[in-house]
Amino acid sequence: MAERDDETLGALAHSISMTYSLLVDVCQALPVPITLPADRHVPVTGAVSAIQRVAELVKDQPMGELQEMQLFTGCIHLLAAIDLYVLCVTRYQETRAEGVGANLIYSDEALRRLLAWLLTNGTA
């Protein structure tokens, strides 16, 4: 059982990293670009504070309400996924692992739609 849990945690960590990379791309494409740490290995504390910073700066972006909401949604769901992941590492529970995955789905969806809008509307 522990081996399967470790595999799940590894897959979730990779998914969190991929969603964070998507957020980095979105932030670079914003009308007022935001630079996030994008080293090969960004410590969780650095990533969390950067994501929180983006969530705080959403209203400063010259874009529509829907796009602001997509960026904010992407950030808060990514933060929730990270929080649940940390809890899951401390004490693995399948429901927490599923919560990480669910939050990443919501974050990815919002960020992908926003990135498509940014690229289509020439703000990037």
Image (cartoon, helix red, strand yellow):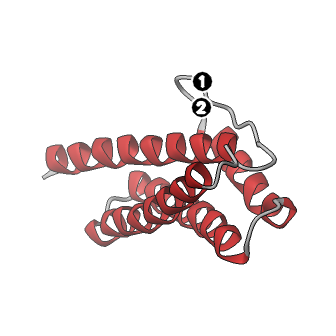
Q: Is residue 45 visible?
A: no
Res. 39 mark:
1
In front here: 107 or 52? 107
Q: Is residue 47 left or right of residue 106?
A: right
- Can the viewer see residue 96? yes
Of helix, strand and loop, which one carries label 2? Answer: loop
Is 14 displayed left or right of 124 in the figure?
A: left
Q: Secondary structure at mark 1?
A: loop
Task: For the residues labelled 1 and 2, say whether their Cβ atoms are less than 8 Å apart.
Answer: yes
Establish if 17 lies above or below 56: above
Which amino acid, mark 2? Answer: Val
- Report the number of discs: 2
Q: Residues within 10 Å of mark 2 (few under 14, many from 20)?
A: some
Please, which residue is most extreme toward the bottom here? 65
Dot in front, 1 or 2: 1
Corner quadrant of residue 24: top right
Q: Is residue 12 above or below residue 110?
A: above
In the rendered image, the vertical position of residue 53 relative to residue 71, given as above or below:
above
Residue 89 x, y percent position in the rendering: 40, 51
Residue at 61% x, 53% y is: 118
User: How many neighbours does mark 1 have within 10 angstroms: few (below 14), some (14-19), or many (20 or more)?
Assistant: few
Quarter of the figure with the C terminus? top right
Q: CA distance from mark 1 to mark 2?
A: 6 Å
Q: Which mark is residue 98?
A: none
Residue 20, percent across and down?
Answer: 53, 45
What residue would you read off at disc 2?
42
The amino acid type found where label 1 is placed reads Asp
